[in-house]
Image (spheres, rainbow, N blue to C red):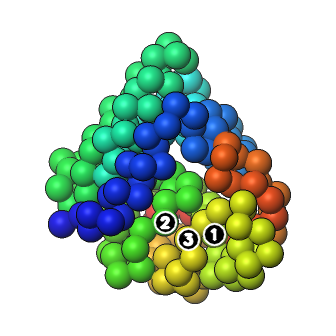
Amino acid sequence: MTDKTWLSRWDDRYSSEAFAYGTEPNKYLKEQLSQLKPGTILFPAEGEGRNAVFAATMGWQVSAFDISANGRNKALQLAEQQQTTIDYQVGELSSLDYQNEQFDAVALIYAHFPGAVKSSIHKMLNQYLRTGGFVIFEAFSKNHLEYIAKNEKVGGPKDIESLFSIEEIKSDFPDYHIIELEETEIELSEGLFHNGTGSVIRFVGQKR
């Protein structure tokens, strides 16, 4: 069952007219998608849809989900503005009807789940990715707490359990050819809540 405090947090964030993280796609996602042939792609914890809508404009068949109905409403609004369509469901992953090996790619872009469930969600997502499919991942690292202490405007979770390490990614996605896996410092300028220098884990892997 979805934690009500967690749900309220995201519904509140997505309730304003402004897009919390902007309407432009994440730069790393944009760079990685440009190297792949469009197919079916899933965006977990997709919020207001900036990345999913971008993928749809590139010719991908897009599925997305989030626990926030407000996020879905904004995403569909953005898709309409961009004259494209996405399939966007509201709910927890375990309650949705995705199929094994349904997707050619899974894009986890700042998909920070509570620490108690994040690994189990990754393993579930692995089942929905076909053999030969790709995971594209960018999210804040455990060292990011040091960056938040210097500048809260950079955003990101403040509990270390929701943040990521290279070791966790290797453990959650063990049967992958690692194309890229690194912890790096980047500059973010994404809407209202991702602004400044941060520490992220970036991962691109192909399922074996």
Q: In the rendered image, which residue does mark 2 sit on?
A: 112
- Name the residue rendered at 81%, 64% in the picture: 197
Q: In the picture, which quadrant includes the N terminus?
A: bottom left
Q: Earlier in the sequence, mark 1 or mark 3?
A: 1
- Name the residue rendered at 72%, 62% in the picture: 154
Distance, label 1 to label 2, CA atoms, is 8 Å
Position of 186 with respect to 143 (left or right) is: right
Position of 73 with respect to 34 (left or right) is: left
Q: Earlier in the sequence, mark 1 or mark 2?
A: 2
Disc 1 and disc 3 in contact, CB within 8 angstroms: yes
Question: Is any atom of residue 26 visible in this view?
Answer: no
Residue 60 pos. (x, y %): 49, 31
Distance, label 1 to label 3, CA atoms, is 8 Å
Q: In the rendered image, which residue does mark 1 sit on?
A: 140
In this view, the mark in front (2 or 3): 3
Distance, label 2 to label 3, CA atoms, is 8 Å
Nearer to us in this view, 78 or 122 = 78
Which amino acid lies under the numbered mark 3 shown in the image of this protein?
Pro
Disc 1 and disc 2 in contact, CB within 8 angstroms: yes
Disc 2 and disc 3 in contact, CB within 8 angstroms: yes
Q: Residues within 10 Å of mark 1 (few under 14, many from 20)?
A: many
Q: Where is 31 relative to 62, above or below? A: below
Q: Residues within 10 Å of mark 2 (few under 14, many from 20)?
A: some
SS at circle 1: strand
Nearer to us in this view, 180 or 132 = 180
Q: In the rendered image, which residue does mark 3 sit on?
A: 157
Q: Where is 95 relative to 22, above or below? A: below
Q: Residues within 10 Å of mark 3 (few under 14, many from 20)?
A: some
